[in-house]
Image (cartoon, rainbow, N blue to C red):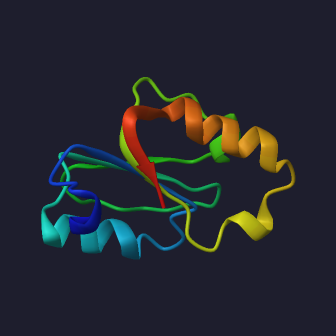
Amino acid sequence: MAKYNVKSGTIVDVGGGGGEMAEDLVERNLFDLIVVVEPQILEINLPKVKVIKAFFEDCELAEKFDVITAFEVMEHILNPDKFLNKIKNSLKDEGIFI
């Protein structure tokens, strides 16, 4: 995050798996809100963390985000155009996708 001068804001972790990334981000206190989008059941009870049980392409997000991550996800995407368009439309103008 330091490389891209991200100091706070909001982040979406697409395909959050077991929630390890969210746990690490809470511990580092980098973001005001951490949204985890995961189609499998994921129970996390951490401050500043919201879990959406859905595929990212199909979920409704009420806001745009500063950062979106998708680690070990792209190889599972059936419609990459739809996925990447959703990423683009869900980022703030200066937002980054990792």
Residue 26 pos. (x, y %): 20, 65
Residue lying farthest top?
Answer: 62
Q: Which residue is drawn at 23% across and 60% down?
A: 46
Residue at (15, 54) in percent of width and height:
7
- Determine the image quadrant of residue 33: top left
What residue sits 51% from the left and 33% below the top? 90
Q: Is residue 19 above or below residue 56?
A: below
Determine the image quadrant of residue 45. Answer: bottom left
Residue 57 vs residue 64: left or right?
Answer: right
User: Which residue is more in the foreground, 82 or 22?
Assistant: 82
Residue 70, image x, y percentages: 55, 62
The residue at the far right in this view is: 78
> Which quarter of the figure is the N terminus placed in?
bottom left
Residue 53 in the image, given as x and y percentages of width and height: 57, 48
Of 42 and 38, the residue lying toward us: 38
- Count of marks overlaid on the render: 0
Q: In this view, does 79 lie to the left or right of 19?
A: right
Q: Which residue is drawn at 77% across and 38% down?
A: 82
Indicate the position of residue 40 as horizontal and vertical percent values.
63, 61
* In front of the other: 20 or 41: 20
Q: Nearer the viewer, residue 89 or 5?
A: 5
- Locate residue 96 relative to residue 60 in the image: left or right: left
